[in-house]
């Protein structure tokens, strides 16, 4: 398999994983919030976030373009939530998905808490780290 084909498959895998990472992260955040407000354990939230961690690990191991294809949009969404919450919530409201609470579009809780920025940043960093090592001579 040529490197170009491998990178193309990586980009396709990263883009295919993006909705799963987005919605699983939001589901995990909502489940943890529900457990916190009920003063109880949140195994469902842990399960959702463990699934996100598994997907992120697979993307990081597949190829740098796979990690970038999923990480850059998540990092952009996290940045938008940090810089302009009103616009971010409006855009999130246009996405298809579940609505646990009226007025809370999918992705709002994970975006406001910074989960998308952290996950996206880690994916981008994992894709760029091999390049930085080669530039530094490591």
Image: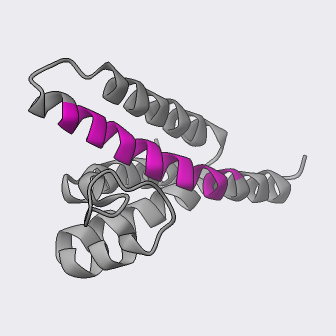
Q: 75 or 110, which lies in front?
A: 110
Q: Where is 66 relative to 27, above or below?
A: below
Q: Residue at x 28, y 42 (%)?
A: 30
Residue 20 forms part of the magenta stretch? yes
Q: Residue at x 28, y 41 (%)?
A: 29
Magenta highlight range? 13-34
SS majority, magenta: helix
Residue 122, x across and y down, in percent: 38, 47
Please indicate, yes or no, whether residue 51 appears anywhere in the rendered image. yes
Q: 127 or 29, which lies in front?
A: 29
Query: Residue reaching furthest right?
Result: 1
Residue 51 forms part of the magenta stretch? no
Q: Residue at x 29, y 74 (%)?
A: 88
Q: Which residue is drawn at 51% across and 65% down?
A: 96
Q: Is residue 136 left or right of residue 84?
A: right
Q: Where is 32 relative to 81, above or below?
A: above
Q: In this view, does 16 lie to the left or right of 46?
A: right
Residue 27, x across and y down, in percent: 38, 42
Residue 3, x across and y down, in percent: 81, 53
Q: Where is 68 relative to 34, above or below?
A: below
């Amino acid at each position: 398999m040529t490197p170009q084909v491998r990178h193309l498959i990586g980009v396709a895998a990263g883009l295919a994983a993006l909705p799963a990472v987005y919605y699983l992260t939001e589901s995990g955040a909502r489940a943890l919030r529900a457990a916190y407000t009920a003063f109880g354990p949140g195994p469902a939230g842990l399960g959702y976030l463990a699934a996100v961690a598994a997907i992120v690990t697979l993307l990081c191991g597949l190829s740098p373009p796979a990690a970038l294809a999923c990480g850059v949009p998540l990092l952009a969404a996290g940045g938008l939530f940090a810089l302009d919450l009103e616009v971010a919530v409006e855009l999130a409201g246009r996405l298809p998905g579940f609505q646990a609470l009226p007025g809370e579009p999918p992705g709002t809780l994970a975006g406001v808490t910074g989960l998308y920025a952290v996950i996206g940043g880690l994916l981008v960093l994992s894709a760029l780290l091999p390049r930085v090592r080669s530039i530094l001579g490591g």
